[in-house]
Amino acid sequence: MQIRNATDNNQPIADTIGGSVTWKANERMQLGGAFNVVRDGVPDPNDDQPREGDRAFIVGYRYEYEELYAGATLTLFNNHDQDDLGNYFSGSGIEWYLGYRWSERLLLRWAISTLNPDSEYEGSYRVLSFVSGASYDITKKIRLLLLTRYDLSKLADASDRNND
């Protein structure tokens, strides 16, 4: 719960409410969820103010077995994210992650990330990127990480984001 004085729409009890819970099914699997609701938002916020109707919900799943680590998250949100023009939108996002421990020190990594506005959004903005790479543990405290991202995202005007 957050009590603040960020807008003229202050709430008497809590301006923002959030929470999370995780459940470890066994040593290999874990499921979690979280939410956040803004109660003091305004229709046209400044950079330091919350947006009216901002709500987000996320669920995640993790699986580990020997050399394999896999995880996924699903996010559903309302007035929570902005496109490249600063327009707020509602939508959903999914992220997938896969890690494979090749050796005691070398971990291979892959990820896919998407973010899609709902059908009421009028632009072409979307996020779609792929990440691959590896990390190498030089010592217990030093890790070398090399990642690359291939981005197929679109800006609001349908042009490529070109943010590899």
Image (cartoon, grey):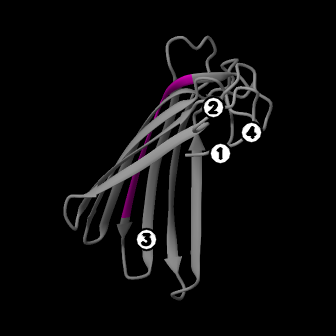
In the rendered structure, are the residues bearing label 1 and label 3 in contact, judged by CB atoms less than 8 Å apart?
A: no
Q: CA distance from mark 1 to mark 2?
A: 42 Å
Q: Residue at x 58, y 23 (%)?
A: 53
Tell me the SS state at disc 4: loop
In the rendered structure, are the residues bearing label 1 and label 2 in contact, judged by CB atoms less than 8 Å apart?
A: no
Q: CA distance from mark 3 to mark 4?
A: 45 Å
x then y, percent, for residue 161: 68, 33
In the rendered image, the vertical position of residue 154 relative to residue 21, given as above or below: above
The residue pinned by badge 1 equals 164
Residue extent of the magenta highlight: 90-99
Name of the residue lying farthest toward the right: 46
Q: Amino acid at mark 1?
A: Asp
x then y, percent, for residue 156: 68, 20
In the rendered image, the vertical position of residue 153 relative to residue 43, given as above or below: below
Q: Amino acid at mark 2?
A: Gln
Q: Earlier in the sequence, mark 2 or mark 4?
A: 4
Q: CA distance from mark 1 to mark 3?
A: 22 Å
Determine crowd level at label 3: few under 14, some 14-19, many 20+ residues with C-alpha closer than 10 A.
some
x then y, percent, for residue 38: 58, 33
Q: Amino acid at mark 4?
A: Asn
The disc placed on residue 5 is 4
The disc placed on residue 11 is 2
Q: Earlier in the sequence, mark 4 or mark 1?
A: 4
Determine crowd level at label 1: few under 14, some 14-19, many 20+ residues with C-alpha closer than 10 A.
few
Tell me the SS state at disc 3: strand
Q: Earlier in the sequence, mark 1 or mark 3?
A: 3
The residue pinned by badge 3 equals 107
Tell me the SS state at disc 1: loop
Q: In front: mark 4 or mark 1?
A: 4
Q: Decide which of 32, 1 is in the foreground and name it.
A: 1
Q: Amino acid at mark 3?
A: Leu
In the rendered structure, are the residues bearing label 4 and label 1 in contact, judged by CB atoms less than 8 Å apart?
A: no
